[in-house]
Image (cartoon, rainbow, N blue to C red):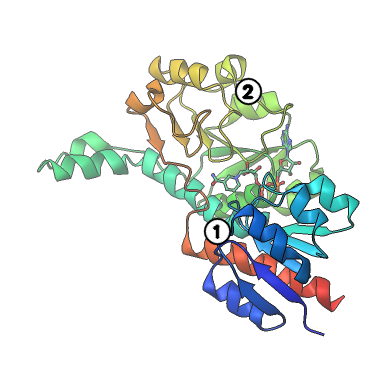
Amino acid sequence: MRPKILIADRIHDVAIEEAKGFADVDLEFNLPPEELIEKIGKYDGLIVRSGTKVTKEVIENSNLKIIGRAGVGLDNIDTEAARKKGIKIVNSPEASTISVAELVIGSLIALMRNIAHAHRSMRKGKWERGKFTGNELFGKSLGIIGLGRIGREVALRARAFGMDIMIYDPRITVEDAREYNCKLVDLDELLKNSDVITLHIPLMDSTRGMISKEELNLMKDSAILVNIARGGLVDEEALYEALKEDKLKGAVLDVFEEEPPGNSPILSLDNVVLTPHIGASTDEAQINAGTVVVEKIRNFFRG
Ligand code: NAD
């Protein structure tokens, strides 16, 4: 028997076609909540992104066996109600790993080689070759905080650029670190000795404000901080002060305490590369967000 699946938010066409390969699929985007509650009873599986709210009422009126969230956060799904009903939930946090890792390296080079400033200068008709002397990644020490999915991919890429890598991650063993040609160190050692520090940890109560004035003071004046993980991990006010007073050479930020960051003074600095939370914004990551979830659902129904 082919399972019946409702796809309630738009996922990539490639993923929809894959779902049609093993299931009877209905596409109903932007359903009003009452209609979703009315229709959900006939489906074995539901796929959403962040738009559809999978409330307690939706879950209680359903015969769902599995809910797939194409993407990461599960805030729009009542996970407790699903658990009580024995409904499995799958998502696709791995979908954007490569995209984020590539943005880390790309933005870092953009900062170190003054690419954005040089581009702007040329657009003004200038040819300021002497002004944009930068630095190489080669031979620099990279401190990675969090050697999870993204941290590992950053490590592999940084290694290819000839960087020396230190890791701080309480859940990683010396052997794990060695497998990635990295040295496992404590946080203070990483902060004191890295030329570039990059964060790849989740935002939780225990990690909020993990990089604040005290940690910034431990870093070299010539260090660069990269945060493409979550705003809130770094105390932005303390970071602004450090950057303004040249107690830190530069920063790469894709995420902010408030998004969009409004009038944050960080926006006025020259020694930063800023992007509007685009870590996962690639065609490939968007395709993966859907196909990874569809694959997990297919495996679930195959048993
Ligand atoms: P992951 O769960 O695979 O890895 C997280 C790692 O952090 C784990 O190895 C864990 O042991 C480690 N860790 C947890 N607390 C720590 C601490 N206090 N100190 C040091 N290490 C700690 O996650 P991932 O897939 O690598 O993603 C990392 C983060 O990147 C996510 O939590 C998310 O916030 C962010 N992210 C951002 C974007 C973007 O668009 N900018 C996209 C995807 C993910």
Q: Residue at x 67, y 69 (%)?
A: 6
Ligand number 1: quarter of image:
top right
Q: Residue at x 89, y 55 (%)?
A: 85
Towards the viewer: 180 or 8: 8
Q: Position of residue 14 (x, y in %)?
A: 55, 75
Query: Is residue 43 at all visible to an observer of this figure?
Result: no
Q: Determine the residue positioned at 59% across, 74% down.
A: 16
Contact? badges 2 and 1 (CB < 8 Å) = no
Question: Considering only vertical position in the picture, is 279 above or below 142?
Answer: below
**What quarter of the picture does the N terminus occupy?**
bottom right
Residue 30 - label = 1
Report the number of numbered marks. Answer: 2
Which quarter of the rendered picture does the C terminus lie within?
A: bottom right
Q: Amino acid at mark 1?
A: Asn
Front-most of residues 296 and 172: 296
Instruction: Find the distance from the CA under tag 2 to the CA under tag 1.
Output: 37 Å
Residue at numbered disc 2: 209
Evaluate whether residue 162 shows in this view: yes
In this view, 70 is above or below 297: above
Residue 55 picture location, percent across and down: 73, 48
Give the SS element for disc 1: loop
Please name the amino acid that badge 2 sits on: Gly
- Which sits earlier in the primary sequence, circle 2 or circle 1? 1
Label 2 crowd bin: few (<14), some (14–19), many (20+), radius 10 Å: some
Compared across the picture, whether 15 is left or right of 296 comes to left
Describe residue 60's horizontal placement relative to residue 131 as left or right. right
Residue 139 x, y percent position in the rendering: 51, 42
Q: Secondary structure at mark 2?
A: loop
Residue at 71% in and 32% down? 204
Residue situated in front as seen by the camera: 115 or 71:
71
Counting from the top left corner in percent of width and height, residue 248 is at 46, 22
